[in-house]
Amino acid sequence: MLGAPRTRELVELRGALEVQAAQLAATRITREGLDRMKDALDTMALNVGDLAAFVEADALFHYEIAAGSGNQVLQELLQSIRSLLRIWVDRALTDEGHAQAAVKEHTAIYEMLRSRSEAGAMTAMRFHMGTAEGRLLNSSPVT
């Protein structure tokens, strides 16, 4: 398991990389990628009471953003970081209220990507990463 300092550093890095991925995806993601994101978003909305299914759909949503960035290195870095943080990501979502808030945040990201707004996608992702990081750090031994 990762120690507290490394966990915090990975969480910080993930947030910055997710914002970068959203910026790039705003102009590069394909229609098919957006369709897969929408499917993942719909699955999340239908599974706010089934947190395992919710987390899986959340991972697919973020995967599509990374893939849509058109930057393979960025995609692989995000996948590696997510794998390292997986246990904490799974624990961070503890109730339906968190899940419902996350659906709203993901919807905002999706809408900005669909409208091809780089600034909007970055802002929406930055906001989401802030709340997600807070949940994640509160669920981990990071002090």
Image (spheres, rainbow, N blue to C red):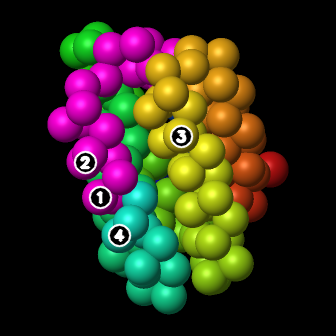
Number of marks in the image?
A: 4
Callouts 1 and 2 close, C-beta under 8 Å: yes
Q: Which three-letter amino acid code belongs to the residue tagged 3? A: Glu
1 inside magenta stretch: no
SS class, disc 1: helix
Which x, y percent locates residue 112?
A: 56, 32
Q: Is residue 120 above or below residue 5?
A: above
For residue 16, which numbered disc appears in the image? Answer: none
Q: Main secondary structure of the magenta part?
A: helix
Q: Earlier in the sequence, mark 3 or mark 2?
A: 2
**Kind of residue sitting beneath label 2:** Arg
Residue placed most toward the observer, 133 or 26 = 26
**Residue marked by disc 1:** 39
Label 4, label 3: how many angstroms apart (C-alpha)? 16 Å
Q: Residue at x 57, y 15 (%)?
A: 118
Q: Quadrant of residue 51?
A: bottom left
Answer yes or no: do the residues labelled 1 and 4 have beta carbons within 8 Å? yes
* Among the two numbered marks 4 and 3 on one chain, the one whose residue lies closer to the N terminus: 4
Residue at 58 percent of width and 27 percent of height: 121
Amino acid type, label 4: Thr
Q: Which mark is residue 111?
A: 3
Kindly state the secondary structure of the residue where label 4 is placed.
helix
Residue 139: quadrant of the picture? bottom right
Residue hosting label 4? 43
Side of 117 where 84 appears, left or right? left
Q: Magenta span covers which residues?
A: 16-40
Q: CA distance from mark 3 to mark 2?
A: 13 Å
Q: Amino acid at mark 1?
A: Asp
Q: Depth check: give the residue in front, 22 or 94.
A: 22
